[in-house]
Image (cartoon, rainbow, N blue to C red):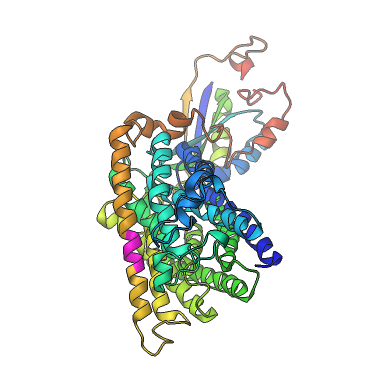
Amino acid sequence: MVHADTAWVMTSAALVLLMTPGLAFFYGGMVRVKSVLNMLMMSFVTIAVVTVLWVLYGYSFAFGGSDTRLFGGFDNFGLHGLSGGPVLSFVAFQLMFAIITPALISGAIADRAKFGAWVAFMAVWTTIVYFPVANWVFDFGYAGDAGAGAGWLVHWGVQDFAGGTAVHVNAGAAALAVCLVLGRRIGWRKDPMRPHNVPFVLLGAALLWFGWFGFNAGSALAANGLAASAFVNTQAATAAAVCGWLVVERIRDGKPTTLGAASGAVAGLVAITPACGFVSPIGSLIIGVLAGGLCALAVGMKWRFGFDDSLDVVGIHLVGGAFGSIALGFLSLTGGLLYADRDAALLGKQTVAVLTVGAYSFVLAYVIAWVVDRVIGFRVDEDDEVSGIDLAEHAETGYELHPSTGSGVRTAASIARPANATEEESVNA
Amino acid sequence: MKLVTAVIKPHMWDAVRDALEAFGVNGMTVTEASGYGRQKGHTEVYRGAEYDVALVPKVRVELVVADDDVDDVVGVLVKAAQTGKIGDGKVWVSSVDTVIRVRTGETDEAAV
């Protein structure tokens, strides 16, 4: 690894870090006024907690150099024994993945999770689910001196360039489990739970899109042609997914929505994540447009099956991640069914990877959430949920709103009126 | 004296204010309100889920006027607030027993 590679990986790490605050705004805009701070905080606290875990033992659990192919090891506690640009930039880069993956889950449990319970769940899930799965998918045997072997999925030949399985299927399956344990919000289906700030959602999606170039192109771990290819493919798929989502909305609902454009972008980014280093630009357009359309339909599942995945983590991350991973079985330039003379071996491996990671994450997330619920209670009191989790859990409110000023009322003009002409005065007799 | 209360479309507020000022009205109380009449709210769609939004944003204008002016003021107000489409709002007039200007202590018509 030359210095340019180290520089690109560090730059990419910073880009990926920005995705988590971006996600916080993407999610924060979608909840109601009374829970915007809690939604932002569930992501922001994940940055803090996972970073501490990563330094203490997380990196070691994921990339610690044992040859089990299932688990990193114990050699790098406290980042012991790691030095030099290539390894430490990899440590930083992979840390950002470990942060955003659990943060993604928080969208499924909006408005109703005790903050302490979320921290406990997130820390335990990251420890016993994310760190091992990161080893399965991301341990290429690269990690400098420590890299003795590769994780079992990557060793077996599964293609996952930047984490369609390890990040998106993983987080999506956990999101389904934890929202099932917590149950539906009070008033779900009955009360309008409209996004309170769609501009925030679009801003968050744009930050995610920007940061995702680090996520995907950075996963080449080098400043080379593979990184540039991943970069172009990421852009192509995301743009196509916005089109796909909006077309579905235009046909189904009559209007293309802002929320739909933001959601389509994220769906495309998710789906191209595993594929961006293995497909052609045309393949990326195909993956993107199909992912956008598919996820636009998939977010309707929760209404049919009755689970309150509040911000559609399942419909976008589980479905999009699984779709992108399995689509590689067809569209990968190295082993895809359409290119490899009808060889379905890769398609089989991709499917097994999705099912294995999804099942592992779902089962353990369910157990962890259930235990957290039993020990400290996962949900806030009913009163607090109705009156607003921001005040109950954080003693804050997101906005100081003055109910008598705002849309349609020309306040600037009335302020400019003479001070002695008070409002109740009217006609001269 | 009469209290004129008008509930109008928010975007008609500027036209109403200009018309009332041109007529000679010096002040009024304006609040954001929400409600519905015959138009029965509206529908919003988020990720394919339709929400019936029962309450529509409105602006409520209140002003106290002398008995002699009330018909003219109401006429000016209604004309300015009218678009002819459903949801234009309502105006009603009620009697007021006493008015006191806080600054000077003047009462009734002198305080209007």
Dividing the picture into quadrants, the one containing residue A299 is: bottom left
- Residue A252: x percent and y percent? 38, 66
Question: Does the stretch in magenta take in A126?
Answer: no
Up-down relation of residue B106 to residue A161 (above or below): above
Up-down relation of residue A129 to residue B56 (above or below): below
| On-image quarter of the C terminus of chain A | top right
Up-down relation of residue A139 to residue A362 (above or below): below
| Residue at 41% in and 40% down | A118
Note whether residue A312 is visible: no
Query: From this viewpoint, which residue is outermost toward the left?
Result: A305
- Residue A52: x percent and y percent? 53, 42
| On-image quarter of the N terminus of chain A | bottom right
> Does residue A223 appear left or right of residue B7 in this picture?
right
> Does residue B35 appear left or right of residue A44 in this picture?
left
Residue in the foreground of this view, choosing between B79 and A182: A182
| Residue at 32% in and 69% down | A352
The chief SS type of the magenta part is: helix
- Residue A105: x percent and y percent? 41, 50
Residue in the foreground of this view, choosing between B15 and A199: A199
Query: From this viewpoint, which residue is outermost toward the bottom?
Result: A341
Up-down relation of residue A125 to residue A34 (above or below): below
> Does residue B33 appear left or right of residue A114 in this picture?
right
- Residue A145: x percent and y percent? 56, 60
Q: Which residues are magenta?
A: A353-358
Note whether residue A165 is visible: yes
